[in-house]
Amino acid sequence: MRSLAFSFRLRLDFSAPVQKHHYTLRCLPGDAPHQRVLSASLRVFPGEPANASEDAYGRLHYGCVFQAHSGFEALAEGTVCSALEEGEMAAPDWQLGPYRMFTPLTAPGEAIRRLNASIPADARDEELATRIMELMHERFAYLPGSTHALTTGEEAAAAMCGVCQDESHIMLSLLRMRGVPCRYAVGYMMGEGSTHAWVEMLRAGRWIGLDPTNYRAVNDEYIRVSVGRDAADCPVNRGVFYGGASQRSENAVRVWDAQVPDEQADMGRKAE
Amino acid sequence: MPDTRELTKHTEDINELLARYGVKFGLYKNGVFKEQLFPFDAIPRVISAADFAELERGLKQRVMALNCFIADIYGEKKIIRDKVVPEEFVFDSPGYLAQCEGTKPPKGIWSHISGIDLVQAKDGSWFILEDNLRVPSGASYPMIARELCRRASPRTFQTNGVAENRDYAALLRSAMDHVNTGGCTVILTPGRYNAAYFEHSYLAEKTGAHLVTGSELTVEDGFLWFNGYDGRKERVGTVYRRISDDYLDPMSFRADSLIGIPHIYEVFRQGNVALMNAPGNGVADDKGIYYFVPRMIKYYLGEEPVLNNAPTYLPYYEKDMQYVLEKFDSLVLKDVAEAGGYGVVFGSKMTKEQKADFIALLRKEPRRFIAQEVIDFRDLDIMENGEAVPRKADLRAFVLMGEEPMVWKSGLTRFSRNPDSFIVNSSQGGGFKDTWVLSH
């Protein structure tokens, strides 16, 4: 167990004023068997506080800024007890169908099939995960700006460069080719300046977090915000607005060891 | 057979009035919007009281089971656990919407209005052709046609013992009220260029609901509001939406939708408004899932299906593939992703090359097709140039879900105007008839 504090700041700049700007933010972590949220808050500027909700992929906040504005900011903060257990217990196998199917972002093509061919056909579980991570580590170039939000895993595999989202999509595709249920996870990681994405793979009934971008297993330095079949299920920010403007978006994330008052830490231990 | 001679004399007058009321069908063809009339034939399809009682029993049963299936798929998925339906037919289908996972619609109802298409074989037995659980249209056509027929020849309806069909509006309203979460009732239309705009406005008038477009609805404080032209805001409790899932909410579904309402799905998921039909129903009316409906009825209700599917084969199963290849020339093949009569091919009508190409495709993508025996339809007479001629026809029956399932004692009978065609869809130029259910 480890107590982590986090802050997430999203800034949108519009080239001209926009109005009726509807947004859905997935930026606050929720309670799960492996993590316990001690505190979490979200503020948005301008506009009324967002409405809280939750769906199959995690917590979300939604709202609308009706008046004209040329900038929008969201600030999320909180503390979380991480790594309470190794991997979240998964639902029974028959409920995991959605995580076994290819999606438009994870469907394999020639490039991913070629990658798959270089992994031994009989590799299973831990060995399969290790082989995929090794392959990505050796051949995939981390190159921000070379891909965008809608780049498919196959496209990224053809170019063999991209960011954490692309590496995760390729890994999901390779796992699903072998019938292994797996999920796309979004969250915050210590030492990473913006939101991060990784993979959860089913192993012995548990979701085991694997971070192909950093070539390691997910540990107590990660805070999970949402999980889905791929990046399209759980974008950190989704919005529509009226106005002929282009949008520039940036986000900043910080995760550090929290000084947690004793009684809150006790709650965390009880959950453990 | 009831005597309809006096009524059929008025066919032309009725069609003229239908045109004047705007009973049209709009079609996009090659990027051009074209409106065409929906030709009405005055000879009704007649269903006896006993025959209809059987249909009613079967339709209620089928819709109940389909509702259980949708709730199960977006919930516990027991039917997958018990291996009644293979999971790839569900979660890989374009009708499965991952956004709907875990959603519980008001009163647990997913398909409030179901349009079930049937055909009658020469021997009188009925077969289900397909289920339409998304936004089935068509009830308004027999409603207004009956109204006009009654005006043209009141005597026909005094002497023939035809069950009333004016109650559709009341059935629809009771289904709307049953799920209402508190507030007014609206019918949401994409607007006047939609193929079924006549129906949207007619049903709004008959049920007393507001007819609205997306720009008149907004989400605020976790609720849905109707913004009247006078600036008043009224909370909405039920939305009978005539916009497809894809376009309903740019925040949950297609981001480029301009006719939807941002966050309406969120409000629905939180139980603060009823959407009828619920988004996500496409998972149950896919042509591939159709094959499994009789098994669903046994699985969820523990009953034998009252109504049969047309004999169907899934090339996905090797045994069925063998049969399809053997009997290719006598079967009709359907692409599961297509609708509106598109993607339907008859084995007997293919050239040798077409057949070879099709079989190659079938082997490559077996999950994409179903094959069915060609049913020998019972033809219905239509009047053409003063003469009665037989044509292929189907029946869309409407099942509404309130406290209990309710089957409307009428329905939309569509016929093919082309004597050689089996395809009756209005989008392919077919016409329609009134459907009489006899009260004795």
Image (cartoon, coloured by chain):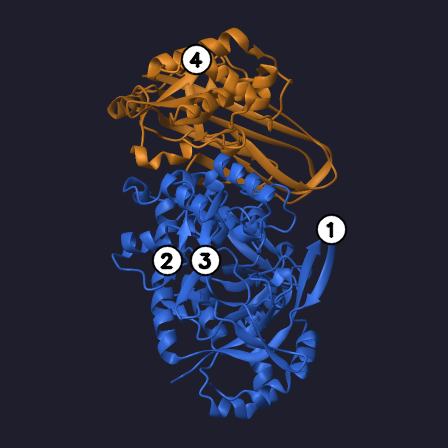
Chain colours: A orange, B blue
Chain hosting mark 4: A
Circle 2 SS class: helix
Picture coordinates of residue B246, whole percent (x, y): 56, 47
**Which amino acid, by three-letter code, is at mark 1?**
Gly
Which residue is under mark 3? Answer: B131
Which residue is under mark 4? Answer: A119
Q: Is residue B401 visible?
A: no
Residues at marks 4 and 2, CA–CA distance in whole angstroms: 50 Å
Specify few, some or many for label 3: CA neighbours under 10 Å numbering under 14, 14-19, or 20 or more: many
**Which amino acid, by three-letter code, is at mark 3?**
Asp
Specify few, some or many for label 4: CA neighbours under 10 Å numbering under 14, 14-19, or 20 or more: some
Picture coordinates of residue B372, whole percent (x, y): 45, 53
Circle 1 SS class: loop
Are tags 2 and 3 found on a single chain?
yes
Are tags 1 and 3 found on a single chain?
yes
Q: Quadrant of the C terminus of chain B?
A: bottom left
Which residue is under mark 2? Answer: B107
Picture coordinates of residue B121, whole percent (x, y): 44, 67
Which residue is under mark 1? Answer: B31
